[in-house]
Image (cartoon, rainbow, N blue to C red):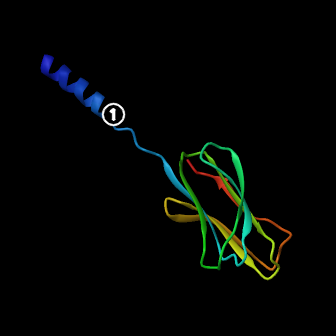
């Protein structure tokens, strides 16, 4: 009887220690800009951050990565100044495109992608 009780306790402890890690790897990605852009994004602590980014060519890209949890809000927005430029903004979750948007020859409207990490 003592052996069975001990085994039962051991099994219960083993199962409770096996918590599933639900962290999601989030990556914000901005590409295709020819002359730089302003980017605003929600960071890992939930604060909104704005930066001015300078690029040398359309090959340059800007990224920001962090770990998030299910239910967290993800947000990135960018705008460029050169009318002859373009921009592509994307959010990747665990390496897969979650949402993306792009713009060409539009220096007035922000290109924004956002959402909530699904449960």
Q: Quadrant of residue 102?
A: bottom right
Give the answer, above or below, for where 16 lies relative to 114. Answer: above
Work out whether residue 82 or residue 75 is closer to the camera in this orientation and state it. Answer: 82
Residue located 74% across and 78% down the image: 86
Q: Quarter of the image containing the N terminus?
A: top left
Judge whether residue 89 can be spotted in this image.
yes
Give the percent coordinates (x, y) of residue 38: 75, 63
- In this orientation, which residue lies closer to the viewer: 45 or 4? 45
Q: Taking the image as drawn, is residue 1 in sight?
A: no
Using a 10 Å C-alpha cutoff, classify the residue at mark 1 as few (fewer than 14 neighbours), some (14 to 19) or many (20 or more): few
Residue at left offset 79%, top offset 83%: 84
Give 2 or 20, whichever is nearer the viewer.
20
Residue at disc 1, secondary structure: helix
Give the residue displayed 25% in from the left and 23% down from the top.
9
Q: Is residue 24 left or right of residue 103?
A: left
Q: Residue at x 54, y 52 (%)?
A: 66
Q: Which residue is mark 1?
A: 17
Where's residue 11, x and y in %? 25, 30
Task: Provide residue 75's location: percent of width, then percent of height.
Answer: 68, 55
């Amino acid at each position: 009887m003592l052996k069975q009780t001990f085994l039962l306790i051991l099994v219960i402890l083993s199962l409770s220690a096996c918590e599933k890690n639900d962290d999601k790897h989030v990556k914000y990605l901005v590409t295709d800009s020819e002359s730089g852009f302003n980017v605003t994004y929600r960071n890992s602590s939930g604060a909104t951050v704005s930066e001015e980014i300078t690029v040398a060519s359309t090959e340059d890209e800007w990224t920001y990565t962090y770990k998030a949890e299910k239910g967290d809000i993800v947000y990135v927005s960018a705008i460029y100044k050169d009318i002859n430029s373009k921009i592509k903004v994307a959010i990747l979750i665990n390496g897969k495109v979650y949402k993306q948007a792009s713009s060409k020859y539009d220096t007035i409207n922000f290109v924004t992608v956002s959402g909530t990490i699904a449960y």
